[in-house]
Each structure stands twice: as C-alpha cells, then as structure tokens.
Image (cartoon, rainbow, N blue to C red):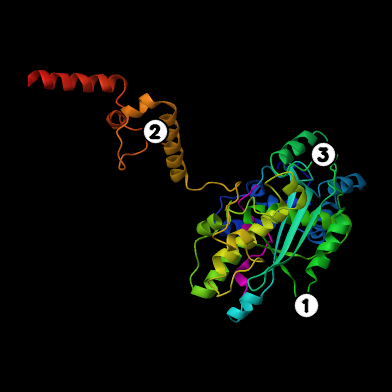
Amino acid sequence: MSQRKGSRSPYYFFVRDQLPELRRRGLPVSSVGDAIPYCSQAWALLTKEEKMVYTERTQKWSEPKCSQKTAEETSDLAHPVPACPATKMLSVSSLPDASAMSWKNDEAVIADIFYFLNIYSHGKLPPLCEQRFLPCEIGCVKYSLQDGIVADFHHFIDPEEPPCGFRYHCQAAGDATHKIPMSGFPLSRTCYSVVLQELLEFVQPVTGLRPHFYCRSNDRFRVNWCLNRMASLTGIESQLELLAVEDLVVELYRKKYQKEPSKTWVCRELDVVLWDFCSNTRCKWHEENDILYCALASCKKIAYCISKSLAGVYGVPLTAAHLPIQDLNYGGSTNTKMVVLDAGRFQKMKAERSACERRSASPSQDQECVPSNCDPPCDPPCGVKTSLYETSIMRGRGVTRLIKSASDLSKSSSN
C-alpha cells in the first residue's frame, strides 16, 4: 500500500510494530512497504479496541499538521487496503493454538468437551472490500470422546448486502459449494444478534473458563472473521477462542503416545469422503436437496474422524453418537451413494461384466476366446494400456491374428 506523503494510517503504525517480529522470522522486510503483505490477516483479526490504539496514535501524529479534514481522512483509513492477501502468515495473527492445552490423565481427555464450528459464506471477496465474507450458514457440534456428539447447533444466516458489483461473484461462489441462494431462500434466516446469542447459550460456558472452538486450519481465517464481523455489528462480546482441529488431534496423540504424528497425515485423515452421504449428517435442507457442502456436516465429519481414529486409542467403545449407525454394523447394507475408493477392483469387475455381456450377445465371439480360469479379463481397465501380444492371446483379431496365422502356415509348410 502506497502512503501519501505527509499522512499515516492506523494500519501503518500496526505494520511498523510488526517489523521486528517479521525480521526475527527471517522474512525479507526492510521497510513498512515490504511488510504490508504479511500483516493484512493479523490486522483483520484485531478487535475494535485494539484498532483504536493505532487510531489514537495516528491522531497524535497528525495533530500538529492536520485540520478537521485530516481527522475525517484518518477515520476513513481505519480500514486500510492491503496490497495483497497473505494466506500463509497466520503466525503473525493473534489466533491461539492448541499446544498449550494439557490434561492430567486419560480420564480428563475422555471427559473434555470440544466444540467444532464452521461458518459458510457467499464466496470470498477481494481485499479491497471491507466485507471479506458474507456469512450465510453456521454449524456447531458439542463433542467428547466419552459421549460422542452430545448436541448440535445450526442456523441459516441472513446475509448482508454484497458490495456493489459483487453480487454475481457471491452467488456464483455459493452455487459452486453450498448452493444457498442469496435471495428467495425458502427457509427462514436468522440475524447476526440471534445467531451469536443462541451460540453462546448453546455453549453455556462455565464461569472463569473459555470454551474452546475448533475448525479446520484452512477455514480458520474465514470463521474467525465472520465471528468478529457479527460481534462488531451487534455489539455482543463473545470472546470465543478459535483453535485449529489439526493441532487438537496432534495433542491427543501426543498425550497418549508421547509422540506426535505429522500434520500432513492428520490433514489426510480429516479429508475423508466416507461420511459425505450418511444419514443424519447434513442439515435437513441440504439432505433433501442432495447437496454435499453443509456447515453442520463438516463439523460432524470432524467428530466422526476423531472417533474413528482416537476412540480405540483411549479405550472408548464406539456408539451411534460417535459414528453413523451403518459404520457400526459392518455387515449391513452399503449406501448406494458411497464413493467407490477401490478403483482397481471396480475396473476389474466392470471388465468382467462387459466380457460376460459380449459372450452372451455374440456366440461367434465366444469361440475366439480361450477359456481359462487364469486368464485376465478380456478388456483391460479403462485408461490402462496393454501390449499388443497380450491382447492377441485373448482376442486373436486383426493384424495380430493375421501374423499368427501366417506363422502357423509357415510352420506347417516347413513340416
């Protein structure tokens, strides 16, 4: 962001304070202008009171040379426009992590309550917009290793009006994921104040203790921004602590084994599609319309993954509150909408089925196949190339059959 000579913004002083920390991390920042891309997210996550400190510094700096017009410009500069977003510099932000969590014993781990939270938005707006997100759906589940999913919370949120010129952008982003329309939604929506009040009632925090909310690390900036946005517009002080669920899983493994798994492995475990179409996972509207992306479902699937991975580690028996019922009954019927993960087996079955259909449809072709239980399927899996000679053993057609016939003829003539 280029600053006009003789003027400063609150964001300028904030970035200047971050310079020592950024240099300590080895980032190539020699001036405020170099540090701006690394501080945009940290600035967006500050509270109004924290930003007011930098606003006061701006006013003190500009008092000797500014009039009332300069004061108005300073208020406009309270929300600066970063040069570019820095999606990977969450370390500069004030978001906590789960590394400080500690439990006395395994019983404390099993009985501890976790809240998994997610908020969906109508797309992500560019940094030049004050409204980075338009919250439209919120989902949260109350979970413990001992009892599984205890309760859930879900609301469709009445979104704000998008900035001028971005309505199509927001609706297109929604159509590609959760498919919640910006207008004409058949169900009732809830305003920001009611959402926050009911979320706090759902949590029912114990006096002196702050409940821990968890979400995926790649959703963390969006969820935190939406919570701060709703709190700033309604005046409700929520003081919710948002942590990364990947850190929670690492801490749970470390507590039991004194070793921590790699975060790559943890992310892969959480990126499952096994329960995408299980009943009682999505909200009623997404379930009825067969839409995959649902804020409530994303929270429940986190609980399912932790139950499947860690319940056995801590000796907790799985119940219907830990996993969907069909996953507990291994001998039950399979959901027809389940994604086929064993692609090789699927391709083999497809090839065998197509071969049987051809034999039943054309008896003449049946004579050309060599009957053997050890032979591979007549057709190779889709996308897999086989050598010409392997095909000739099964088919004996075309040029290969002609060459084979000529070879047999030459052998018989020589005899």
Image position of 379 (left or right of 154): left
| Marked residue nearer the N-terminal end (1 or 3) | 3
Residues packed near mark 3 inside 10 Å, few (<14), some (14 to 19) or many (20 plus): few
Tell which tag, 2 or 3, sits nearer the viewer: 2
Check disc 3 and report the residue beneath it: 163
Tell me the kind of residue under disc 1: Gly
Q: Position of residue 321 (x, y in %)?
A: 67, 66
Instruction: Specify the label residue 55 is tagged with.
Output: none
Instruction: Specify the label residue 379 is tagged with.
Output: 2
Check disc 1 and report the residue beneath it: 208
**In the displayed structure, would residue 341 be above or below residue 371?**
below
Quarter of the figure with the C terminus = top left
> For residue 129: magenta?
no
The residue at 58%/79% (across/down) is: 106
Tell me the kind of residue under disc 2: Asp
| Marked residue nearer the N-terminal end (2 or 3) | 3
Residue lying farthest to the left in this orientation: 415
As measured in the structure, the alpha-carbon distance from the residue carrying label 1 to the one carrying label 3 is 40 Å
Q: Position of residue 336 (x, y in %)?
A: 60, 47
Residue range of the region highlighted in magenta in the rendering: 86-102
